[in-house]
Image: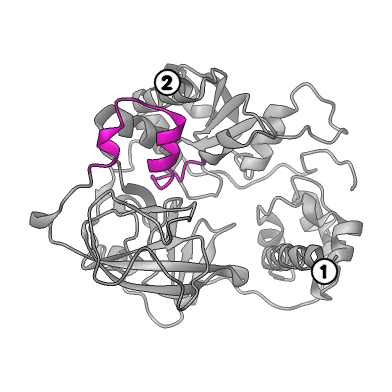
Amino acid sequence: MRRRTFFGFVKSKLRYTTVDETLPEPVAVAPSERVTLFFDQPYIPGEKLSLHPGDPVKKGERLSLTKDAGGYALAPKSGRIENISGFLGIGGRRFTTVTLAIDDEAHQTLDEGFKSVYQSPSLKNAREFLAGLPGKPNLEVFFNPQRPVKSIVVLGVDSDLVGVTNQYFVNNAIVAIKTGIDTLRQISGIHEVILVVPHYLFKVAGAAGATIKTVDSAYPSAHPELIMRYILSEQSTPDVEPPSDDGVAVFTAEAVVAIGSAYKTGFLPLEKIVCFVSKDETRRLISVPIGTPVKDIAEAFHEPIGEGDRVIFGGPMTGVSVYSDNHPVLADTNTIMIQDRRRIPEVRDNPCTNCGACVRVCPVNVPVNMLIRFLQAGRYEEAVSQCDLNCCIECGFCSYVCEARIPIFQYIHLAKLTLAGMNPVEKNNG
């Protein structure tokens, strides 16, 4: 692997969206009839499950597919299980979905499981009840004896261009962030906490009781991997590979607020703050239960989704298209965009013209003009060994500037998924 500097040669002209006084408070959007929960386990027909169609479910109940399953989801509403099925995601990744037909508001019932333990905060009960909260807090990181956590990083920035969820919490709920940070310190015993924010939120962030680091407004400065390299390599020289991020636990500002709120009130916060971008590029913050289908959000704002329109989960640079308006809001969904079919940027399967634009903007200096040649030929292993495929942070900047309109980001993503799928097979055959 080549040792490269972290930052590209040309200053970015793209700037992150900021939270300001012109952006209204989040609008509450309720699911109309049902919600859908994703489980990071493949659906196996005939497998004996702990959940069954017709089972009643309480709001806040911890749902697991099997008794031995490590992962779980939190029911955002009470109701009954309507359907359990498989879902094929990006790159062939397989999930199991559980759809709940929700009770009306007058008949909503709360699960008391977390309320029985919330007054005694611990990593054990946080792991048991809070992993499905908004922001999808990664609590497993504290249970790996091979990588003991020494510091906690809280991201008060949003990695793609139009998202503002984490900035919203820093700007409007800094006291709640402090409560969450204090809670994390209490349950983990780790006192070194770094809060990363944009420059314009530096003064506000000071009330969080953490060490404050700032990032530039130029894209992709707020990318999590660049942030980690910046924080962990401040004392290193530019030409040296960054140190490992072992020993660091990373949480979003939203996840920290959710953890603090849960232990403060005894109730699990189950509504997600999402930036919803309409076809005319109007931007709104919404508060929506996890599992709400995107069609309910679109209908709430009279935004029809027609044939050929595109629904993107994530921002314009790194977002992923979904293929059904029934796709639900997930615990880590920060942005949903609806693109009019007439305004979708054109992409082509052209050969690279070697203009060099992608190389000049790459923040980690990958030779993208050479990399894309290997990727278009399907020579993924050579892309790793000769063109630093694994160094790519997938910021999407190369696709944005490509004069030939090659979907470079998608080629890179596909190559990494393909290689990840090949490695387990190779290990089993070895």
Q: Quadrant of residue 327?
A: bottom left
Marks 2 and 1: in contact by CB < 8 Å? no
Mark positioned earlier in the residue sequence (1 or 2): 2
The prevailing secondary structure element of the residues shown in magenta is: loop
Classify mark 2: helix, strand or loop: helix
Marker disc for residue 429 = 1
Residue depicted at 22% across the width and 54% down the height = 58
Q: Is residue 309 visible?
A: yes
Identify the residue position indicated by label 2 in the image. Answer: 182
Q: Is residue 355 visible?
A: no
Say whether residue 164 is left or right of residue 92: left
Classify mark 1: helix, strand or loop: helix
Say whether residue 333 is left or right of residue 300: right
Say whether residue 286 is left or right of residue 128: left
Quadrant of the image containing the C terminus: bottom right
Q: Nearer the viewer, residue 15 or 131?
A: 131
For label 2, the crowd category at 10 Å Cα-Cα, with few meaning under 14, some 14 to 19 and many 20 or more, is many
Q: Which residues are magenta?
A: 112-138
Q: Position of residue 354 (x, y in %)?
A: 86, 65
Q: Quadrant of residue 370?
A: bottom right
Residue depicted at 36% across the width and 37% down the height = 258
